[in-house]
Image (spheres, rainbow, N blue to C red):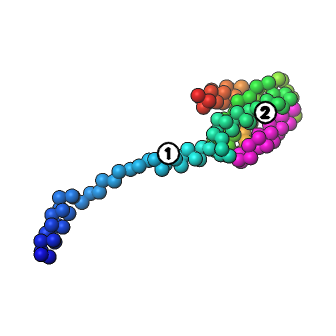
Amino acid sequence: MKKMVLSCFLAIFVCCGCSLAVTENNLLKARTAKAEEIKNGKSMAERAADVKEKIGRIDGVTGSAVVIEGHTAIIGLRTKDLQKKEQKQLTNDVQAATVQADDTLYFVSVTMDENIVSQIEKEEKTRMR
């Protein structure tokens, strides 16, 4: 009887082969990624819209583009002609308003360079879809 059980076990082992085919389930990764995207119950696009609204209230800002990725905000500003000192003050005001609008942001980058602002605007449009 023992020989019979042992031989059956050996036959099953030989027939199955030595490799294990693991079926990968990415469902857990997808849920984790989706949960990471949402901070304070808002998606990154919603957070960017909130920041953009807050920035729009600041004097001197004629237009803005905001992209948020995780804990980082990249902001492009369109302004009327300002002196260097006024630009620095406006940048500081925008950074303060951004952190006030979304407290989950650790890094805020503000630029007034025309080329970079247009690239941020393009990225903002693709993320809003």
Look at label 1 and name its amino acid. Ala
Q: How far is mark 2 from mark 1, CA to CA? A: 33 Å
Name the image quarter holding residue 107. top right
Decide: is 114 above or below 106.
above
Residue 55: mark in rendering: 2
Q: Earlier in the sequence, mark 2 or mark 1?
A: 1
Position of residue 12 measured from the top left corner of the image (x, y, whole percent): 18, 62
Residue placed at 59% from the left, 47% from the top? 36
Position of residue 117 measured from the top left corner of the image (x, y, whole percent): 69, 28
Question: Can residue 84 be seen at all in this image of the molecule?
Answer: no
Q: Which residue is mark 1?
A: 30
Query: What range of the chain is rendered magenta?
Result: 86-106
Tag 1's secondary structure? helix
Position of residue 21 measured from the top left corner of the image (x, y, whole percent): 30, 53
Position of residue 85 measured from the top left corner of the image (x, y, whole percent): 87, 34
Decide: is 95 above or below 53.
below
* Magenta span contains residue 16: no
Decide: is 58 above or below 18.
above
* Magenta span contains residue 92: yes
Of the 4 image quadrants, the one containing the C terminus is top right
Decide: is 45 above or below 17.
above
Q: Magenta-highlighted stretch: main secondary structure?
A: helix
